[in-house]
């Protein structure tokens, strides 16, 4: 019997939110950058005090289980609703529209903007990748179904530098690539039982992901070459994002830290002031800092490139802030799994 080794936050998220065909192998791309290739980029450090105002918007569907969130090409934010089997859209003024996924109980999980003016999302319970246009038209692509009919763990998805979408296949220990027409290729992570979780595009044209079970940060080039780096603290990496400083930043749930890894693999870790805060998602903000959610601490955190951390309490108690994204309006938007809300955090500096 197969076992699913979901990372801790994925398991917590599922509890809170719910109540093999592959394409042709890709040819090697000789011009693909290596994981350590460094582009020219400078981070802007902001020493000013940053003030935050948080507004919250109730989701129409009851117990919808808002999970992931991403900025769309239409000036709105799009989010997955794990509990109600929907994809939601929220405008800057808080107006929400919901679209039902065709497959029953699909478990919409991760979502990202694609290169084709559509949003792409994973369907955790039925092993599919979905695509939704700005007018709500949904297309679904089967990844593959395990022989026991259990979820394979499509936990993360991101747009790649090659015009395709890249995703994690957690339980099968693979990284997947899907083209706009639905052709899928999969690459096995070198470390046995690595179980990849979240994935993001790096500024040097590679893809980076977390391996919660093997306690590593992984990198894959567009030609399928892997590099892996061990994380100092035990069983910690959860979600990952590209930073403004040519580095990748990730959350560490068990060790209650924010991690930073350079393109050459050097890792630094910063403890979060709130004890057992449950750091979940992380994103590069519009202010030169990184912003992250604290699932257990009910806060939104901000960390500067030099490791300075500030925390902001979410108005609704025990709201369960989970995923976070930057909106087209320059604000931070995040999901509240417990409170069934979408929230907007605006910044002022002084």
Image: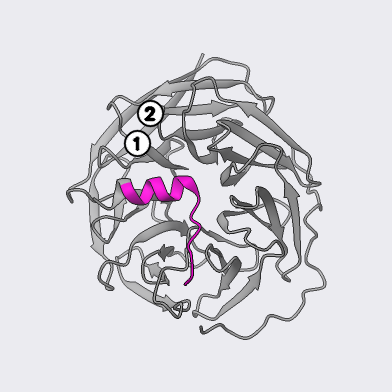
Does the residue at mark 1 contact the one at mark 2 (Cβ under 8 Å)? yes
The mark nearer the N terminus, 1 or 2, is 2
In the image: residue 92, left or right of residue 331? left
Quarter of image, res 31: bottom right
In the image, farthest residue toward the front: 1
Question: Does residue 55 appear left or right of residue 216 in this picture?
Answer: left
Extent of the magenta region: 1-15
Q: Position of residue 295 (x, y in %)?
A: 41, 35
Is label 1 in a helix, a strand or a loop? loop
Q: Is residue 208 at all visible to an observer of this figure?
A: yes
Mark 1 is surrounded, within 10 Å at the Cα level, by few (under 14), some (14 to 19) or many (20 or more) other residues, namely many
Q: From the viewer's side, name the closer residue of 316 and 215.
A: 215
* Residue 312 sits above or below residue 141 on the image: above
How far across and how far down the image is residue 194, in percent?
A: 63, 58
Q: Which residue is mark 2?
A: 298
User: Could you tell me which residue is drawn at 25 percent across and 71 percent down?
Assistant: 104
Q: Indicate the quadrant where residue 265 lies.
A: top right
In this rendering, the answer to whether 29 lies above or below 227 is below
Q: Marks 1 and 2, Cα distance to the nearest angstrom?
A: 6 Å
Q: Which residue is mark 1?
A: 320
């Amino acid at each position: 019997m197969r076992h699913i080794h979901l990372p801790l936050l994925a398991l917590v998220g599922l509890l809170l939110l719910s109540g093999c065909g592959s394409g042709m192998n890709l040819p090697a791309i000789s011009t693909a950058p290596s994981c350590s290739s460094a582009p020219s980029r400078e981070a802007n450090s902001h020493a000013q005090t940053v003030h935050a105002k948080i507004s919250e918007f109730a989701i129409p569907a009851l117990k919808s289980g808002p999970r992931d969130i991403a900025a769309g090409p239409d000036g709105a934010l799009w989010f997955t609703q794990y509990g109600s089997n929907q994809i939601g859209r929220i405008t800057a003024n808080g107006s929400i529209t919901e679209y039902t996924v065709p497959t029953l109980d699909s478990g919409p999980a991760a979502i990202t903007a694609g290169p084709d003016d559509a949003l792409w999302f994973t369907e955790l319970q039925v092993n599919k990748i979905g695509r939704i246009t700005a007018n709500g038209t949904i297309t679904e692509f089967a990844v593959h179904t395990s022989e026991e009919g259990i979820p394979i763990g499509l936990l993360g998805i991101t747009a790649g530098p090659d015009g395709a979408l890249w995703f994690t296949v957690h339980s099968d220990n693979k990284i997947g690539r899907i083209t706009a027409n639905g052709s899928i290729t999969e690459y096995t992570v070198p470390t046995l039982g690595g179980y990849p979780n979240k994935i993001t595009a790096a500024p040097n044209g590679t893809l980076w992901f977390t391996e919660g079970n093997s306690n590593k940060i992984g990198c894959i080039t567009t030609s399928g070459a892997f590099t892996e780096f061990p994380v100092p603290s035990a069983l910690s990496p959860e979600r990952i994002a590209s930073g403004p400083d040519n580095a990748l930043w990730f959350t560490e749930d068990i060790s209650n830290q924010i991690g930073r890894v350079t393109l050459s693999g050097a890792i630094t870790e910063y403890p979060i002031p709130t004890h057992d805060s449950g750091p979940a998602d992380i994103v590069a903000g519009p202010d030169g800092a990184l912003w992250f959610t604290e699932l257990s601490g009910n806060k939104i955190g901000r960390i500067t490139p030099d490791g300075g951390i500030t925390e902001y309490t979410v108005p609704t108690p025990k709201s369960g802030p989970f995923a976070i994204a930057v909106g087209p309006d320059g604000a931070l938007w995040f999901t509240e799994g417990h409170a069934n809300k979408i929230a907007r955090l605006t910044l002022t500096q002084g």
